[in-house]
Structures are given as C-alpha cells and as structure tokens.
Amino acid sequence: MVEHWDVIIIGAGPAGFTAGIYGARSGLRTLVIERKTAGGAAAVTPLIENYPGFAEGISGQDLALKMAAHCRKVGATINEIESVSRLSLKNKEKLVETDRAKYTASAIIVASGCDYRQLGVPGEKEFAGRGVSYCTTCDGPFFRGRKVLVVGGGNSAVVSAIFLANLASSVKLAHRRNQLRAEEALIKDFDMHRVEILWNTELKEIQGDATVKSAVLFNNKTGGTTEIDVDGVFVQAGEDPNSQVAKEAGVDVDEEGYIIVDERQRTNIEGVYAAGDVTIAPVKQIGTAVGQAIIAAVEVFGYIKRPYYYK
C-alpha cells in the first residue's frame, strides 16, 4: 500500500526541520525526507555565531542534532538517506516517489536547499572544512589574521573578498578572466579594500597536511604555474538549487533554478510550498530559512484543515 501523510517535507536542513516541528505540533501527520544524513548545509559548518540564542556560538552539527531531536520529539518522522526521484503534483493528492517507496500527501513543502558549486580540483574535497570553505560569513572569522584566497569573479566572490579583507592579514582573489562579473557598485566598493586581484588565474590544486597550506595557480594567459602560501581557500563559484525534481513536476523556477514563491511561500501549484535556500529568497541564512518554513507550515495547516476560508 502507498502510505499517506498530511504533509511531506523534502529536505532535512533547518527549513525542513522547522516545517516538520510546526507541522507535527499542529497535529498534521508529518514526514521529512532527506537524501543525505539530516542537517543540510548547516551540519558541515564548523561554528555558527549569528543564530539567536547562541551567543557563544554552536557547531552546525550540534545545532542540526538539536533541531532533528526537536522535530522527532513533537512527532514528525525523518527518513534519512532516501532520495526523492519523482513528484506528481497536479492532483489534490500529491504523489512522492523515492528510491525506497511511494507516498501520497495532501501538501508538499520543498526545503531541499542548495549545493555549493565545486571546482573539482585536487585537494578541494580532501580539505573541505579544514581550510576549504564555501561560506564566507560562516567560516571567515576563523581566518582572522591569516592568509586567504578567494576563487571567483561574480558578486559572491567580491562580497566575500571585501568581508575577508576586514579579518585576514592577506586576501587574494583569483579570477580566470581579466574582468570581474560583479555589479559595478560592488566593484567600486571593492576598489577601496586591500585585496590583490590575480587576473586570468585558475586554481589547479590545493595542498597541505592536516589543514590547507598552499594553492597551485595557473595563469591561462602566460601559461605559467605558481604556488602561493595560504591558510584558507574560499570557493565562490555559486550555488546550485536542488530544485530539479520539483521543476520536472511543474513547479515554476527562475532562470537560476530557484523556486518561485509568494509572501506565503506558495508555489504556482496549489498545495505545494517551498522554503529555505532552494527558493528565490535573497538571503540564504539559517534564520531566514527558519522564518520561511514557519510560514509554509502554518499555510499548510490552513490549506488542509481550514479550506473553507483558506484562500
């Protein structure tokens, strides 16, 4: 038999946990499905210092464990290592197919987050969390007074370099072209900070022992290769929203693949909502993901339990 739930939440990061907590607490039969282990991107963040209530900071893993425990305590079910492969959303009863089972639900909340875009160079995977970072605001403070390299040429790379310039002893920005792709206003601000730009430069390898010690760079104009000493490498090649399955089911996304939602976290399909980093929300932070998930879960309750005035 196909198991039926009131609401199925796709993704077990901060948004998914929060939606699960609010859904279960309101009396909805709630299932959270996560393709990896529960926690999302937050779980791999060494230290979180900007989440309210944790003035001394908390590791991403600890915060994720607390959220997961809270979610389970109020009655939500969390299925880990289960990938959603197909959604059928046009009917009132939604169908969710995974690599393990099929489910139906009265409502869906997509909280599948994003994956940081990786470069695929040697050492990148090996030193992730040990000097290689994809989140400047999360990990930047760990590199106070140290030497860092930012890789990229768009808005996120420039913003990251500016942020790090106030912390690190040395900031270099490696961009594979001879012109930044960032907005003009950011570039003007960028010019005011002490950042060395390495034009026509590509990252080829990250080296070290227990942590990052150096980076191998290739100049695609001269053909020369150099090795520089760095303590940290911040990869700012963008993010890829995990929205493909939802998009294939008819959920509208923008040109970058982020799910389009309104102020009530509704998508273009009735009974389907989205929250967190996978949406068009401009700020990708745990706090904003939590807020969006609360709205989505409250809206789901109204949609399921009070349809006579829910519009």
Image (tube, rainbow, N blue to C red):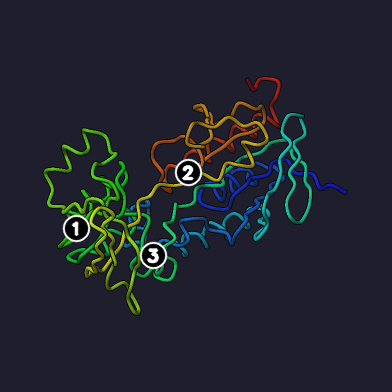
- The residue singled out by tag 1 in the image is 171
Residue 38 appears left or right of 155: right
Looking at the image, which residue sits at the far bottom? 209
For disc 2, the neighbor class at 10 Å (few under 14, some 14 to 19, many from 20) is: many
Q: Residue at x 70, y 20 (%)?
A: 308
Is residue 156 or residue 46 the one in the foreground? 156
- The residue singled out by tag 3 in the image is 46
Q: Position of residue 188 (x, y in %)?
A: 16, 37
Q: Residue at x 77, y 34 (%)?
A: 93
Q: Residue at x 44, y 52 (%)?
A: 117
- The residue singled out by tag 2 in the image is 277
For disc 1, the neighbor class at 10 Å (few under 14, some 14 to 19, many from 20) is: many
Tell me if label 1 and label 3 are in contact, CB under 8 Å: no
Amino acid type, residue under disc 3 in the picture: Pro
Q: Residue at x 79, y 44 (%)?
A: 4
SS of the residue at dot 3? loop
